[in-house]
Image (cartoon, grey):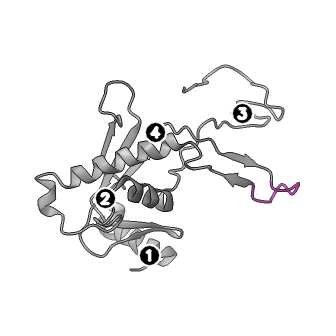
């Protein structure tokens, strides 16, 4: 499998020149929302399905060179709260970021419920007829403890930050440099 910039350039050129390949389709072609308990009310889990197999590595997605499908699960409103802090007085230094994934165990419970439902989806006809193997996790992962260990090891942020706004002294800023609200116009608050 080719990774990194070289692969991105090849796939980009393929799409640009022929209109085909992974660049010609959205990352996720099927999205579903559900509640972990199957009840009514706001969804708390999102599923994303892609008709391509890929591994999410530290360097970025690595596309498989064989037919596959990928299913991803998101906890929509996590209970855990992370933080971002200045790492130094240097304005060009990267901030210190602590996402605190699973600081609140309820997030792991939601992800576990989502993972188990996703596996049931893949094991249900007619989809199960097309599944010839599992990549991650393997079918060896069965018990809740095994699932929890796998999820703790492999989970990552989907980078959907909450409570973000532009700061500063321009017309698009929501708050000034002392965090005072500029104008209530166009503010949205999600609970």
Marks 2 and 4: which is nearer the front?
Answer: 2
The CA distance from mark 3 to mark 4 is 26 Å
Look at the image and tell me in which quarter the N terminus lies.
bottom left
**Residues at marks 2 and 4, CA–CA distance in whole angstroms:** 24 Å
Say which element carries label 4. Answer: loop
Which mark is first along the chain, 1 or 4?
A: 1
Q: Which residue is mark 2?
A: 142
Q: Is residue 27 magenta?
A: no
Question: Which disc is residue 173 wearing?
Answer: 3
The answer to whether 108 appears left or right of 164 in the picture is left
Query: Label 4 to label 1, Cα distance in Å?
Result: 31 Å
Q: Is residue 35 above or below residue 72?
A: above
Residue receiving disc 1? 7
What residue would you read off at disc 4? 76
Q: Residue at x 38, y 32 (%)?
A: 43
Asked if residue 44 is positioned above or below residue 1 in the image, the reply reads above
Of marks 1 and 2, the one in the foreground = 2
Report how far apart the C-alphas of labels 1 and 2 lie in the structure.
35 Å
């Amino acid at each position: 499998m080719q990774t990194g910039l070289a692969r991105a350039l090849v796939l980009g050129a393929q799409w640009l020149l022929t209109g085909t390949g992974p660049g010609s389709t959205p990352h996720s072609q099927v999205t579903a929302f559900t509640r972990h308990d199957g009840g009514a009310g706001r969804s708390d889990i999102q599923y994303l399905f892609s008709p391509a197999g890929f591994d999410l590595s530290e360097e970025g997605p690595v596309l498989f060179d064989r037919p596959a499908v990928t299913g991803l699960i998101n906890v929509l409103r996590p209970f855990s709260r992370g933080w971002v802090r200045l790492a130094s007085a240097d304005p060009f230094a990267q901030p210190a970021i602590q996402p605190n994934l699973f600081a609140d165990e309820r997030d792991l419970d939601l992800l576990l419920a989502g993972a188990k439902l996703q596996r049931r989806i893949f094991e249900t006809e007619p989809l199960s007829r097309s599944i010839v193997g599992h990549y991650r996790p393997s079918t060896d992962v069965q018990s809740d403890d095994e699932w929890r260990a796998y999820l703790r090891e492999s989970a990552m942020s989907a980078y959907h930050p909450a409570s973000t706004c532009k700061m500063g002294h321009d017309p698009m800023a929501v708050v000034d440099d002392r965090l005072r609200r500029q104008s209530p116009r166009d503010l949205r608050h999600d609970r």
